[in-house]
Amino acid sequence: MKNEVLNDYVFHYSPYRDQWAAVHRDYYLDYFNGVYDNVVFNESINSLTSFIVKKWHSQQKSEQ
């Protein structure tokens, strides 16, 4: 199931920036403390989820 990787991420919408943020659960405390090193931003939640799934699939292929 290709979308299982999304369970490892926290998604947060900021109405002030009009953007979605996606951060891996390992770094979500940093994100909520203002550290954005491991965060991906986009106006579209669909673009964020597609990016994460594609990135995960490419990592899986490179590990084989």
Image: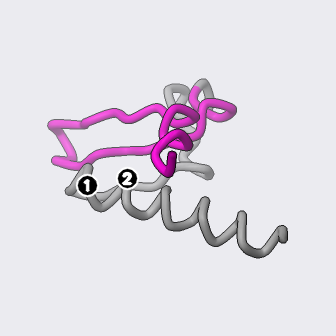
Quarter of the image with the C terminus is: bottom right
Q: Which mark is residue 46?
A: 1
Residue at image coords 34%, 33%: 12
- Image position, residue 35 (x, y; %): 58, 40
- Marks 1,2: beta carbons within 8 A: yes
For the residue labelled by badge 2, is the local secondary structure a helix, a strand or a loop? helix
Q: Which mark is residue 6?
A: none
- Which residue does the numbered mark 2 point to in the structure image? 49
Taking the image as shown, residue 51 lies to the left or right of residue 36, namely left
Direction right: furthest residue: 64
For the residue labelled by badge 1, is the local secondary structure a helix, a strand or a loop? helix
Taking the image as shown, residue 49 lies to the left or right of residue 55, namely left
Taking the image as shown, residue 62 lies to the left or right of residue 13, namely right
Amino acid type at mark 1: Asn
Residue at image coords 72%, 72%: 61
Residue at image coords 61%, 52%: 37
Residue at image coords 46%, 55%: 40
Q: Rounded to the nearest whole Å, what is the CA distance between mark 1 and mark 2?
A: 5 Å
Q: Which residues are magenta?
A: 1-28
